[in-house]
Image: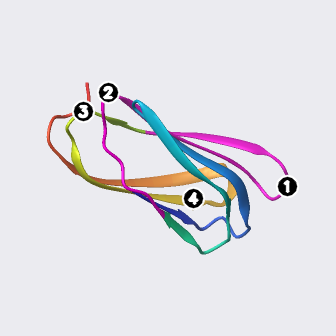
Amino acid sequence: MAVQNRTGEPIRLLEVDYPSASFGSDALADGASFHYRIQVQGNGRLKVLYTSAEGRQIQIDGPSLAERQEGTVEIELLPAGRAEFHPHLSGPSAP
């Protein structure tokens, strides 16, 4: 999984939640990327949470994931609390 900060500002307290686990980073500079290898165990929605440079708490719901899916998910964090999710997954579809 890759998270790219394209918000135009640094962010803090990045957290990515996915079925049965989560990962994150204390900070991510504008233009920087954070890569993390995951294994999906269970079914559920991907969620991204972070704190903007202004101190605003941002929460964004992403695509649903299913156990045994394999591949990559790219997350582009955009200005105004938006994000684009680019899943490239194979295996069972999410319910």
Question: Label 2 is placed on what type of residue?
Answer: Asn
Label 1 – label 3 distance at C-alpha: 36 Å
Give the percent coordinates (x, y) of residue 26: 69, 56
For residue 62, above or below residue 84: above
> How many residues crowd around disc 4 within 10 Å: few (fewer than 14), some, or many (20 or more)?
many
Q: Amino acid at mark 1?
A: Glu
Q: Which mark is residue 77?
A: 4
Counting residues from the N terminus, which is met first, the one under dot 3 or under dot 2? 2
Viewer-nearest residue: 12 or 60: 12
Q: Which mark is residue 43?
A: 2
| Mark 3, secondary structure of its residue | loop
Q: Amino acid at mark 4?
A: Leu
Mark nearer the N terminus (2 vs 4): 2
Q: Marks 3 and 1: in contact by CB < 8 Å?
A: no
User: Magenta residues, as a range?
Assistant: 35-62
Write down the residue under mark 3.
Answer: 67
Give the mark, 4 or 1, whose residue is nearer the N terminus. 1
**CB of mark 3 within 8 Å of CB of mark 2?**
yes
Q: Which residue is mark 1?
A: 54
Work out whether 63 lies above or below 3: above
Q: Position of residue 7 (x, y in %)?
A: 66, 64
Q: Amino acid at mark 3?
A: Glu
